[in-house]
């Protein structure tokens, strides 16, 4: 193996905090980090297909001039192909064939985009998403599928699928992601990385009053990276409708995991009547003794509010959300869309074949969903944490997703968001941890959820689990010699 390739692999094995520390010590330069990441991407991208766009020449120039005293000087990152972490001059395609030809180019940094830039992160490119970020698998027709580094025939989930695959394969140590139903946590579970959804309003959105369900963060390999980046990004707009004050002590909390009090942890293996796949249940079962080893009381019984979910209501709301995404693209391109402009599922969501959803049906569904969310949140009066699967099933094959009809895709999306979407509705912090693998090597994530604003507690517990069963050095065999 060449010296350059050895150096690239050594740097790729470091998390973002480790790379920044190496620069601060003077062991390597910001330019070294970016050059190593580019070599890694060039080696892996042809197999995995995580990127929709690269800007290597610009990134190299930025790395050559970045001050070493930034928190993350030269640490490479990818931005998701969406609008929640834009930076000036970087295009956005939303996984769509029209925008692939005529992309939207950012003229200003969003709050998260600016924060990442100011901290010294260097953006190497844009990670793939499904079209309009609207599938639970990342295989947009316009850009081609992203393949799971653990099994190239398998899905990486969605919508932050390109980000998860890039982190899992060591292209970058962290990658931006966003979600309004599990789009960080689902890909994290499928790709064997860490996926945190912070408390609603803790990390700013470009339009702070636009969505109660949307959350903005990154995917990474270690808890200390998640905590350090949350310290960096936390601080939403206090004038926003959805705002959560920050403690800005997340890295400290993660480092002090041994000092946790005795916590009460509930367990769920089903959600709204949907029972998780046996492999996902086994991952939950295997996590219980780890939590008990940390000194927690685990109460393994049915969690009533979670088992009362209404799948039909959720599907109705997804249909409305899909129609709004369709209309948003029409407004962006400035003309009515045709079936040649979007994928069949998006066309189906924008032009449903069944009866239209009436305003009364929509308002009733919103009311029932919010009442249910209040019930769920009240459960935390007696518990500190909830342990449950991240996704109802292991990653499926890309081919199985490609062969689905539009209606079948809607059912898949609804199912695969069943264990994550509820906590976008409540706004509570939730994290997917890569604690387990099947016998064939496919990752199986487990999810922990804490009460509103308890991100520090969630990260501390996650750090305790990481210490008991480390995953940092678990790498897929793809892209290795």
Image: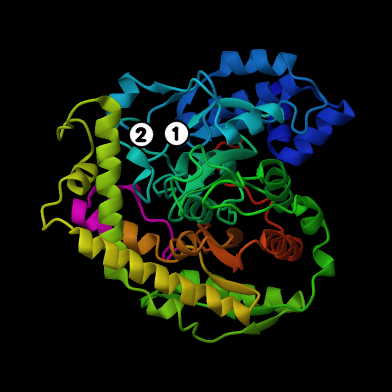
Local packing at callout 2 (Cα closer than 10 Å; few below 14, some 14-19, many 20+) is many
Query: Would residue 5 be visible to someone looking at this image?
Result: no
Residue where numbered disc 2 is placed:
95
Q: Position of residue 123 (x, y in %)?
A: 59, 26
Residue at the front extreme, as displayed = 239
Closer to us: 13 or 236:
236
The numbered disc on residue 50 is none
Q: Quadrant of the C terminus?
A: top right
Tag 1 and tag 2, C-beta contact below 8 Å: yes
Apparent side of residue 27 relative to residue 459 in the rendered image (left or right): right
Comparing 318 with 218, the one in front is 318
Element at badge 2?
loop
Q: Is residue 456 visible?
A: yes
Report helix, strand or loop for mark 1: loop
Quadrant housing residue 369:
bottom left
Residue 361 placement (x, y as % from top left)? 22, 64
- Horizontal and vertical percent position of residue 191: 52, 50
Q: Where is residue 221? Give x, y as percent.
A: 65, 48
In the depicted structure, whether residue 339 falls above or below residue 239: above
Q: Which callout, 1 or 2, points at the residue further toward the start of the chain?
A: 1
Alpha-carbon neighbours of circle 1 within 10 Å: few (<14), some, or many (≥20)? many
Residue 117 magenta:
no
- Residue, x 47% and y 35% (percent of image)? 50
State the separation of the CA atoms marked 1 and 2.
7 Å
Judge left or right: residue 421 versus residue 192: left
For disc 1, the marked residue is: 81
Which range of residues does the magenta coloring cover? 391-410
Q: How is the image coloured?
A: rainbow
In the displayed structure, does residue 230 sit left or right of residue 340? right
């Amino acid at each position: 193996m060449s010296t350059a390739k050895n150096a690239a692999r050594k740097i790729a094995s470091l998390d973002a905090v480790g790379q920044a520390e190496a620069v601060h010590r003077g062991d390597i330069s910001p330019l070294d980090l970016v050059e190593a990441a580019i070599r890694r991407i060039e080696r892996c991208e042809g197999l995995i297909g995580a990127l929709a766009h690269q800007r290597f020449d610009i990134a190299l120039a930025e790395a050559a001039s970045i001050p070493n005293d930034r928190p993350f000087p030269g640490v490479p990152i990818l931005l998701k192909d969406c609008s929640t972490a834009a930076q000036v001059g970087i295009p956005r395609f939303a996984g769509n064939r029209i925008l692939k030809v005529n992309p939207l180019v950012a003229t200003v940094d969003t709050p998260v985009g600016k924060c990442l830039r100011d901290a010294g992160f260097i953006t190497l490119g844009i990670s793939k998403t499904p079209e309009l970020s609207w599938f639970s698998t990342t295989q947009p027709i316009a850009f081609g599928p992203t393949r799971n580094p653990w099994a190239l025939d398998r899905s990486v989930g969605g919508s932050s699928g390109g980000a998860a695959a890039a982190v899992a394969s060591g292209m970058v140590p962290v990658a931006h992601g966003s979600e309004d139903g599990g789009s960080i946590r689902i890909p994290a579970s499928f790709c064997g990385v860490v996926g945190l959804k912070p408390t609603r309003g803790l990390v700013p959105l470009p339009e702070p009053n636009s969505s109660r369900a949307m959350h903005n963060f990154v995917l990474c390999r270690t808890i200390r990276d998640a905590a350090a980046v949350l310290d960096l990004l936390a601080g939403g707009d206090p004038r926003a409708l959805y705002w959560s004050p920050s403690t800005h002590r997340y890295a400290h909390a993660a480092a002090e995991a041994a000092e946790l009090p005795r916590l009460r942890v509930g367990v769920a293996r089903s959600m709204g009547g949907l029972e998780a796949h046996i492999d996902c249940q086994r991952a939950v079962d295997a996590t219980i003794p780890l939590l008990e080893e940390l000194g927690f009381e685990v109460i393994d019984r049915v969690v009533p509010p979670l088992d009362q979910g209404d799948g039909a209501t959720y599907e109705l709301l997804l249909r409305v959300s899909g129609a709004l995404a369709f209309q948003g693209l029409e407004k962006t391109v400035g003309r009515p869309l045709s079936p040649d402009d979007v994928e069949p599922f998006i066309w189906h969501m924008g032009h449903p074949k069944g009866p239209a959803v009436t305003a009364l049906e929509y308002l009733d569904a919103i009311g029932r969903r919010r009442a249910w969310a209040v019930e769920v949140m009240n459960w935390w009066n007696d518990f500190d944490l909830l342990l449950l699967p991240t996704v109802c099933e292991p990653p499926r094959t890309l081919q199985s997703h490609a062969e689905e009809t539009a209606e079948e895709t809607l059912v898949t999306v609804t199912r695969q968001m069943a264990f994550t979407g509820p906590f976008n509705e409540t706004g509570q912090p939730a994290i997917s941890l890569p604690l387990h693998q099947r016998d064939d090597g496919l990752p199986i994530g487990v999810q922990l959820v804490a009460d509103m604003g308890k991100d520090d507690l969630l990260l501390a517990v996650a750090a305790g689990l990481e210490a008991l069963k480390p995953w940092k050095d678990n790498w897929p065999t793809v892209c290795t010699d």
